[in-house]
Image (spheres, helix red, strand yellow):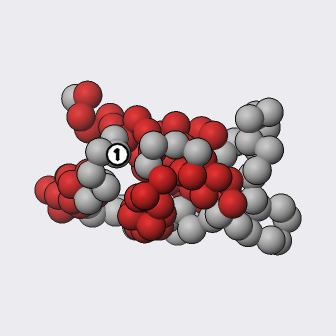
């Protein structure tokens, strides 16, 4: 049986990247707000009737709907670009990829 190769990870670079992502947040937008947006996109919740991804069709309609109905209306492009940097290019990837990364970014601040 073949052994798996161990990953070598430069913790300084990982920490520097996480800090850069926190620094690139749009002005006035916190990690808590971004977490709220990601949680809003849970298709199992009754509040997310505008969830855009259905099967093979992907959309940002749920995220855009949340942004337009919040105080961050004028910052939609910055918010969507920041979420895209985390791997969230549609509603389902914002929920599945960006949310765990936002939680990790927040966890660094608690430690």
Q: Say if 43 sits above or below 14 in the image.
A: above
Quadrant containing the N terminus in the rendered view: bottom right
Find disc 1 in the rendering and name its residue.
29
The one of 63 and 43 positioned closer to us in this rendering: 63
Q: Position of residue 87 (x, y in %)?
A: 49, 65
Residue at the limit of the structure toward the right, as seen here: 55
Q: Position of residue 102 (x, y in %)?
A: 41, 45
Q: Position of residue 86 (x, y in %)?
A: 43, 61
With 2 as the anchor, is 96 left or right in this view?
right
Q: Position of residue 67 (x, y in %)?
A: 54, 51
Quadrant containing the C terminus in the rendered view: top left
With 22 as the anchor, is 5 left or right in this view?
right
Using the rendered image of the protein, determine whether residue 84 is visible from the camera's viewpoint.
Answer: yes
**Can you tell which quarter of the image residue 105 is in?**
top left
**Residue located 73% across and 69% down the image:** 58
The one of 52 and 13 positioned closer to us in this rendering: 52
Q: Say if 108 sits above or below 82 in the image.
A: above
């Amino acid at each position: 049986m073949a052994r798996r190769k161990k990953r070598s990870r430069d913790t300084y670079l990982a920490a520097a990247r996480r800090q850069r992502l926190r620094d690139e947040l749009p002005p006035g937008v916190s990690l808590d707000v971004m977490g709220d947006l990601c949680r809003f996109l849970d298709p199992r919740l009754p509040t997310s009737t505008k969830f855009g991804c259905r099967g093979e069709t992907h959309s940002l309609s749920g995220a855009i709907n949340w942004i337009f109905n919040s105080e961050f209306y004028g910052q939609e492009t910055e918010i969507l670009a920041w979420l895209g940097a985390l791997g969230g290019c549609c509603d389902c990837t914002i929920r599945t990829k960006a949310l765990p990364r936002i939680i990790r970014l927040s966890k660094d601040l608690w430690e």
